[in-house]
Image (cartoon, helix red, strand yellow):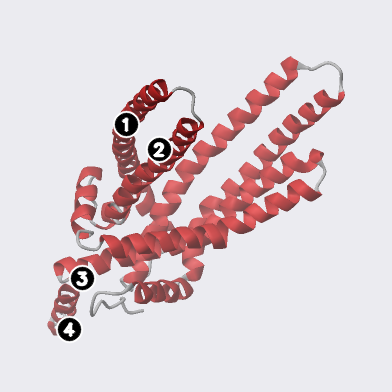
């Protein structure tokens, strides 16, 4: 299989077309790479959470019917459910990270026309695991720091406006106009706060869009990967932001919506005794859906990374020179 060519910068439509084509061509190997992590995770989460939640719900419903409440049993069931939920969540973070990196390695091999076994991609993913953990922690710390600064600024503005309203109310006395104005102001501050919180997250996510690919392909550290992604995405913000929204909608509508509908009908149609088991099964099913989503996400990130290199670094010229060098290189003769 030949490597994917990059004759010119790709539009979003062209890029997604290549993603779907590569997805079909390497479907088996990409899906198998993510499945070896998510299938065991789905089974474990369905069993553990299903049993724990069933016991918890049974105890609650029994307590409602009885005149006395078994507080000790309820506390034990709550602690068990929370503990198992945290255990599954921690396992999901670890296995999900390795699955993501291994699928990225498979996607990079697919884009460059290389054959890579599932075992080799898993080894690559494990080799970059701690770097990816460092990248995740670093981005989380930066985002939390930005949100704290924003929160303090919004809180200061809210305090100032509250003081102004209090002064206005004291001057005008009890007035419906002041009450309506206060309500409108509170709602405006609430929506403004939500918008201010979302915009920095969207901006940073877009500028760091290809950082995971950088730590895999260029084998650099977390700080260097963020700087590299920042440089590559310069001048392409709105195009990548549109792609990010499109992927968010695709993930929400195509993958998350069916699970939400199943959960809704399960709550409406099934008996309350089955709710715990159904929630456990749905949690496992969400991990199974990730088997199909991770390859698509990985291919998109890898193709965006190489497309940005074409735009910023003439990567297509580098590929052509490399191919020309290989074509004119004389064959090596076996040593006597």
Q: Give the mark nearer the N terminus: 4 vs 1.
A: 1
Q: CA distance from mark 4 to mark 2?
A: 64 Å
Residue 86 percent coordinates (x, y): 55, 32
Q: Which residue is mark 1?
A: 157
Residue 114 is at least partly visible in this image? no
Q: Are marks 2 and 1 in contact (CB under 8 Å)?
A: yes
Q: Disc 4 vs disc 3: Cβ atoms closer than 8 Å?
A: no
Q: Residue at x 31, y 29 (%)?
A: 152
Residue wearing tag 3? 310
On screen, 306 above or below 218? below
Disc 4 residue crowd, few under 14, some 14–19, many 20+, Cα 10 Å? few
Dot 3 alpha-carbon crowd within 10 angstroms: few under 14, some 14 to 19, many 20 or more? many
Label 4 residue SS? helix
C-alpha span from label 4 to label 3: 22 Å
**Residue tagged 4:** 327
Relative to 294, say whether 15 is above or below. below
Real-space Cα separation, disc 2 to disc 3, in angstroms: 43 Å
Mark 2 or mark 1, earlier in chain = 1
């Amino acid at each position: 299989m030949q490597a994917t060519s990059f004759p010119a910068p790709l539009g979003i439509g062209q890029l997604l077309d290549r993603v779907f084509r590569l997805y079909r061509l390497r479907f088996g190997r990409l899906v198998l790479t993510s499945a070896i992590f998510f299938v065991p995770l789905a089974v474990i989460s369905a069993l553990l959470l299903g049993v724990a939640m069933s016991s918890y719900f049974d105890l609650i419903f029994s307590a409602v019917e009885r005149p006395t409440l078994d507080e000790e049993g309820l506390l034990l069931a709550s602690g068990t459910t929370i503990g198992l939920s945290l255990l599954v969540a921690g396992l999901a973070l670890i296995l999900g990270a390795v699955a993501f990196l291994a699928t990225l390695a498979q996607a990079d091999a697919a884009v460059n026309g290389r054959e890579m076994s599932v075992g080799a991609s898993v080894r690559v993913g494990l080799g970059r695991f701690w770097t990816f953990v460092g990248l995740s922690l670093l981005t989380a710390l930066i985002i939390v720091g930005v949100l704290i600064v924003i929160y303090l600024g919004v809180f200061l503005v809210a305090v100032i406006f509250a003081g102004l309203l209090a002064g206005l109310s004291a001057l005008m006395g009890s007035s419906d106009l002041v009450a309506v104005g206060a309500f409108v102001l509170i709602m405006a501050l609430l929506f403004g706060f939500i918008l201010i919180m979302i915009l920095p997250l969207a901006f940073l996510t877009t500028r760091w869009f290809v950082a995971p690919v950088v730590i895999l392909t260029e084998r650099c550290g977390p700080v260097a990967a963020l700087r590299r992604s920042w440089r590559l995405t310069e001048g392409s913000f709105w195009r990548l932001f549109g792609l990010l929204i499109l992927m968010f909608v695709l993930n929400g509508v195509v993958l998350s919506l069916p699970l939400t509908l199943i959960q809704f009908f399960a709550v409406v149609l099934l008996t309350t005794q089955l709710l715990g088991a159904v929630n456990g099964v749905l949690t496992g099913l969400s991990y199974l859906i990730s088997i199909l989503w991770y390859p698509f996400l990985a291919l998109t990130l890898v193709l965006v990374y190489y497309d940005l290199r074409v735009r910023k670094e003439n990567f297509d010229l580098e590929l052509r020179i490399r191919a020309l060098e290989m074509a004119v290189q004389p064959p090596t003769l076996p040593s006597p």
